[in-house]
Image (tube, rainbow, N blue to C red):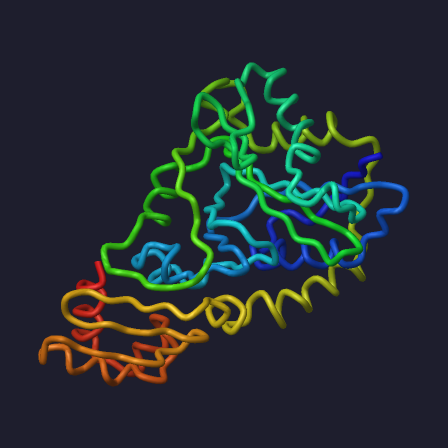
Amino acid sequence: MLTLIEVPEGESPFFYAALEEWLVRHCDCAESDYLILYVNNSCAVVGKNQSIYKELNFNFWWNEAEKVVRRVSGGGTVFHDAGNLNFAFISKFEEKKVNNYRYFNEPIRQYLIANGIPATFNARNDLIANGKKISGNAQFTDRKNIISHGTLLVHADLQKISAALKENTYTISTKAVSSVRSSVANIAMFNPKLNSVMQVKKELAATLTQQQQLLQPQAIEAVKILQREKYEDYSWRFGRSPQTQLSNQYFSITISEGKVSHVQYHDPAFLFIEKVANQTFTKYALALTLHPEEIARLTHCMQ
């Protein structure tokens, strides 16, 4: 049996990231599996073991740092907006379910096929249509339960996705898990009638689930505590990024645990970057260290 958990709408992306972790750790999946469906505001969501400095375009995370979310599962970076539907299955842990995305996502594929979309699984178990990725997925388990979650591009802003995830021009050195970049498409491109996220959400809920239940107020409060204490915290969002070195012809900067641990300049004109040592590498922290013209030079040269 699959039960739909109706979750609050219009919450922060940090709330939904916290909700997914809370559910996988607290759901009783003895009698039923669970499904949540939700829509996020515009944000970038990186995998648990990724470096944001590698995955996100410098301009995006520099100017939209408050929109960078780190999730509990591994995998690659995705971009959410109002044209993207997010889904998460929570199920009792079994070894056969680990990395078995078809086990969870086949009903979604069948829904798409029924609506004229040529959805298939690729070698990475992403859902694709005519060679273009329409859904990416990741998993996390605490060995009691497992969550298998993903995205479904309905009518997302593909230009914004491309801009947010565009590769930077500086050289990056890190041992962090890297995303596999793919060409993407909206399902509305294959069936113009499926151009409403709310419509797809409603139809998937009706097709996949047998019963519904509300998320209780005490659960919501617990999720909001996790949201504040973990998911909105700098050390989780930025500090968890594995050590990363950013370099170009002018200078190199090494970032460890979200702070600049080493700087080296190759041109005397960039002597000022020494001042960022031991500073958190975000727009707001660096603004307290560097003059505006230095920030402008730094951001320009990192492109």
User: Residue 152: image x %, image y %?
Assistant: 55, 35
| Quadrant of the image occupied by residue 150 | top right
Toward the right, the furthest residue is 31
Q: Is residue 146 above or below residue 201?
A: below
Residue appearing at x 37%, y 60% in the figure: 61
Q: Is 165 left, or right, of 246 in this rendering?
A: right
| Quadrant of the image occupied by residue 55 | bottom left
Report the label total. Answer: 0
The quadrant of the picture occupied by the C terminus is bottom left
Residue appearing at x 31%, y 59% in the figure: 58
User: Residue 298: image x %, image y %?
Assistant: 21, 69
User: Residue 238: image x %, image y %?
Assistant: 46, 68
Residue appearing at x 64%, y 37% in the figure: 101
User: 218 or 117, which is in the foreground?
Assistant: 117
User: Residue 281: image x %, image y %?
Assistant: 36, 73
Q: Is residue 16 above or below residue 209?
A: below
| Quadrant of the image occupied by residue 246 | bottom left
Q: Is 228 left, or right, of 61 in this rendering?
A: right
Q: Is 127 left, or right, of 160 in this rendering?
A: right
Q: Is residue 222 above or below residue 157?
A: below
User: 99 or 80, which is in the foreground?
Assistant: 99
Q: Is residue 294 above or below residue 2?
A: below
